[in-house]
Image: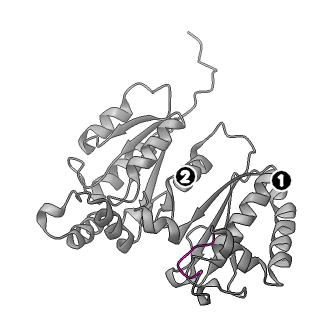
Amino acid sequence: MGEMTDTVQPQHVVLVTGPSGAGRSTALHGLEDLGFEIIDNLPLGLLPRLLSGPPMPRPMAIGVDARTRGFSAAALRKAVKAAAAHPEMLVQLLYLDCARDVLFRRFSETRRRHPLTAKGSLQSAIDEEYGLLSGLREHADILIDTSDLSLHDLRAELARWFDEARTTVLSVSVQSFSYKRGLPHGADMVLDCRFLRNPHWDKDLRAEDGRNPDVAAYVKKDANYEPFVAGLIRMCDLLLPAYRAEGKSYFSIALGCTGGQHRSVVIAEDVHNRLAEAGWHVSIRHRELDAKGSSGL
């Protein structure tokens, strides 16, 4: 019998891990939508047997966390190294990270039970899990920090890494934020809106946000408003087609003000609408306003 001449594609395996509350389940659902076969909480002892079996017709995503039987950071690193040694395997470790204070807020607001809380308080459970995961973050092939990501943002980031069938469609995200809470993670362009007149000093507008027409009118009366927004749109007219031509699939614009409630929200809404009217696939998020009514991932 002659040798096979067909090119065999390697079995693509993504091991998904990270602290509880960072979005592991959301990521697995997102990868499933991208065509991955999903296996969650497979005992680590069975991982070599699974990977040594017949190749799957689809790529695989395997969820692993501190609850997984036989889990340890060292054991997972050893399993990844052993699997990656096979030339017919393409193995990647995807680590979903998140700031500890954000994890605490997510569990507190949703009243979800952390899997390790039986041993102590919520904060001690989060700290203990970080200890169990120690070293994995540094060994990750792909690291995604979900601290400031919405469900849509995380799915877009997964598509950027794993959607092999994606076209050259460029997804644009516009978000407002507060400088008091720090810069958004992963933003491609950050612009400071604090030079504009501030509705906070108007007692009738202080409690409203930038989606209120009166607040928007107040901010737009600033003589610098229209030149600023028009200049930003001109910049997007130049940059977005160039990024799309280079194959970039996701671009994030972050607009900040002091509290993330008034000025940045007004401009984010305006920029979102202008880009959508120009035909771009664009989404919008108001980080501080969303935080008031949602716990995130």
Residue drawn 50% across the image and 53% down it: 151
Q: Which residue is mark 2?
A: 152
Tell me if residue 136 can be seen.
yes
Asked if the stretch drawn in magenta spans residue 265, the answer is no
Residue 189 placed where, x, y %?
70, 71
Q: How is the image coloured?
A: one colour
Write the start and end of the magenta stretch as one range: 205-210
- Specify whether 263 is left or right of 178: right
Q: Is residue 231 above or below residue 16?
A: below
Closer to the camera in the image, 164 or 263 = 263
Q: Is residue 203 above or below residue 248?
A: below
Closer to the camera in the image, 199 or 133 = 199
Identify the element where label 2 is drawn.
helix
Q: Which residue is mark 1?
A: 278
Asked if the stretch drawn in magenta spans residue 206, the answer is yes
Residue 246 placed where, x, y %?
79, 53
- Specify whether 291 is left or right of 43: right
Occupied quadrant, residue 208 = bottom right
Residue drawn 85% across the image and 73% down it: 231
Residue drawn 58% across the image and 27% down it: 8
Tell me if residue 133 can be seen.
no
Closer to the camera in the image, 239 or 265 = 265
- The three-letter code of the residue at mark 2 reads His
